[in-house]
Image (cartoon, grey):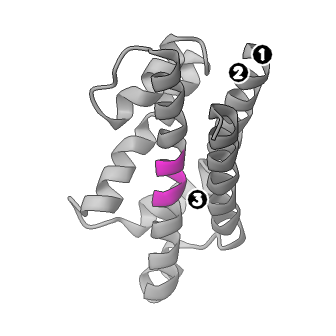
Amino acid sequence: MKREEKIARKIKNMLGYVDFLKKHSTSEKELLEDYLLKSAIERNLQLAIESALDIGEVIISSEDLEKPEDYRSIIIILGKEGIIPVQFAERFSEAAKLRNILVHMYTEIDPAMISQIMENNLDDFDKYAQYIARYIKFEK
């Protein structure tokens, strides 16, 4: 499979997870009361973040860029290389921390934090997809 096809598939998947999240936007109270909804939201958020990181890894690998030390640095490297804007990379790289919390449950997942992210940060995935698509198109 070509790199562009792989990235396009991952973007489609990522945006599908985000679409689910946007359709099920909810309050902190609802997250506390509805375990099934909370679980579905957490899982789709995790998958959206992992898709974004996978996209970054594909680009880094295919371009033979600096090797990331951790998940956060995947996004930071994309910013350093001009693939996405640096300021956006700094902000969006915080998603890697959330991914680790969601996957490893290092701390109890705060429903207020999840609700806030759903209200304020889901559009970052759309922006990320646009930056990546623009980069792939420009590179051709």
* Three-letter amino acid code at the position of disc 3: Met
User: Residue at image x 69%, y 64%?
Assistant: 22
Q: Which residue is mark 1?
A: 138
Q: Which residue is mark 3?
A: 118
Q: Residues within 10 Å of mark 2 (few under 14, many from 20)?
A: some
* Three-letter amino acid code at the position of disc 1: Phe
Nearer the observer, 111 or 46? 46
Q: Which residues are magenta?
A: 46-51
Work out how far the residue at label 3 is from the one at label 2, CA to CA, in angstroms: 26 Å
N-terminal of the two: label 3 or label 2?
Answer: 3
Work out how far the residue at label 1 is from the one at label 3, CA to CA, in angstroms: 31 Å
* Three-letter amino acid code at the position of disc 2: Tyr
Q: Hey, which quadrant is residue 133 in on the image?
A: top right
Q: Which residue is mark 2?
A: 135
Percent coordinates x, y for residue 68 in the rendering: 33, 25
Of tags 3 and 2, the one toward the viewer is 2
Image height check: is 27 above or below 126? Answer: below
User: Residue at image x 69%, y 38%?
Assistant: 129
Is residue 114 on the magenta stretch? no
Q: Residues within 10 Å of mark 1 (few under 14, many from 20)?
A: few
